[in-house]
Amino acid sequence: MKDNPFVARLGLFFDDLRRQRIDGAAVFSEANIKALTGIECDNACLFVMPARPGGEEKDEVEFFTDFRYVPMVHRLAPWLKVRDIKAFSGKTPLTIGRRTFRRVGFESSIPHAKYALLAKVFPGFDLPHSAKVYMAENPQSHLAPGAEFIDVLPGINKLRAVKTKDELDCVRAAAALNDVVWTEARNRFRPGMTEREMARIIKHLMIDKGDGEAFSTIVSVGKNAAECHHMPDDTVWNGCEPVLVDMGVKLDGYCSDMTRNIVPDRQSSLYRKIYSLVLEANRRAIAAVRPGMKASDLDGVARRYLAKAGFGKKFGHSLGHGVGIEIHEAPVVGKRSQYVLEKGMVVTIEPGLYIEGVLGVRIEDLVIVGDKGAEVISSSAK
């Protein structure tokens, strides 16, 4: 990796920081660092500093990490300036050239301890004693007392929501492998197996063929499927009950997500009706996908259909979510979502109906928002 594969996304992030008059942004999240640089590191801070209009500075990025990862970063991203993460220890305020940091970007998702650390690295109105001493001893310092912290997470999430061409290829490959794993696992399932045993089959296949599970596989036999995120237990499948399986394999750092149901030859009339309704809601929502469409309107396509059928209150979750480096990322496809669908977004379409103590059905496909509609990349029969 000689060049940044996400240079365009990083450029947009610089622009976003400039619009907000942010002097520098500290990015700690592993997923966000990867989405901006392509580097995977579990102890790092990416510090992004935009050029000021009319100023002498240029757009700059510095990568803070410890000695364990320095050779890797040098090899994979020679364009990155690497510094010791001890500079973010909070023992002394951070200095970078002659830059001043009055408005500092941070991710609101970071733990409080990280936020407290930033308050030391970029002293606020009530400067710690060490910062006061440092500034007194270093009058040339360009630290700005009274640093203001600005949440940049919404902006990063929005940038990550639209995938690059290479990212889309990675998600397609993960979804294709997920289909392979489902087919092989389904062929290995036998009556008498427990939910745990069935989930274990899927997990081992994902480890053998990919990078493991994108999330803990859900296997729900019979009425357990009424629990949306049921944890597989010792419930035994007798071969005659329906089974709901929600699964996703990770491949080359990207996730997939799909839900399928094992439908018995003999079904209750209620199950048959519920399954038919959920399948139709899934199909209608997929057919409605368009760039420029509000995510909330897409959610409404499935929600209104199920409500009209008399089961609106049994559909209690959002229609879908984004998928990429993480299994749950922007955009949210829900009735209160503020997102607008754009070409290159990857979202799940997963309507479901749940009747507590009786049954549950969810049908989930992974789709890419294209120029004119949805590209469905989950190909398993449903």
Image (spheres, rainbow, N blue to C red):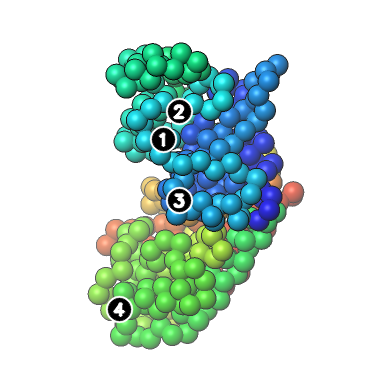
Dot 2 or dot 1, earlier in sequence: 1
Q: Residues within 10 Å of mark 3 (few under 14, many from 20)?
A: few
Dot 4 or dot 1, earlier in sequence: 1
Where is 195 relative to 101, above or below? below
Which quadrant would residue 341 be assigned to in this image?
Answer: top right
Q: Residues within 10 Å of mark 4 (few under 14, many from 20)?
A: many
Q: Tell us which disc is closer to us: 4 or 1.
A: 1
CA separation, marks 2 and 1?
Answer: 7 Å
Quadrant where the N terminus is found in the figure: bottom right
Residue 115: image x %, image y %? 36, 32
Name the mark on residue 94: 2
Dot 3 or dot 2, earlier in sequence: 3
Q: Is residue 299 left or right of residue 108?
A: right
Q: In this rendered view, identify the residue nearer to me: 359 or 347.
A: 347
CA separation, marks 3 and 2?
Answer: 19 Å
Amino acid on which the number 4 mark rests in the picture = Thr
CA separation, marks 4 and 1?
Answer: 49 Å
Q: Tell us which disc is closer to us: 2 or 4.
A: 2
Residue 45: image x %, image y %? 47, 40
**Residue lying at the far right of the rendered structure:** 371
Q: Residues within 10 Å of mark 2 (few under 14, many from 20)?
A: many
Which quadrant would residue 235 be assigned to in this image?
Answer: bottom left
Residues at marks 2 and 1 touching, judged by CB atoms closer than 8 Å: yes
Q: Residue at x 30, y 85 (%)?
A: 192
Q: Residues within 10 Å of mark 1 (few under 14, many from 20)?
A: many
Amino acid on which the number 1 mark rests in the picture = Phe
Amino acid on which the number 2 mark rests in the picture = Leu
* Residue at mark 1: 88
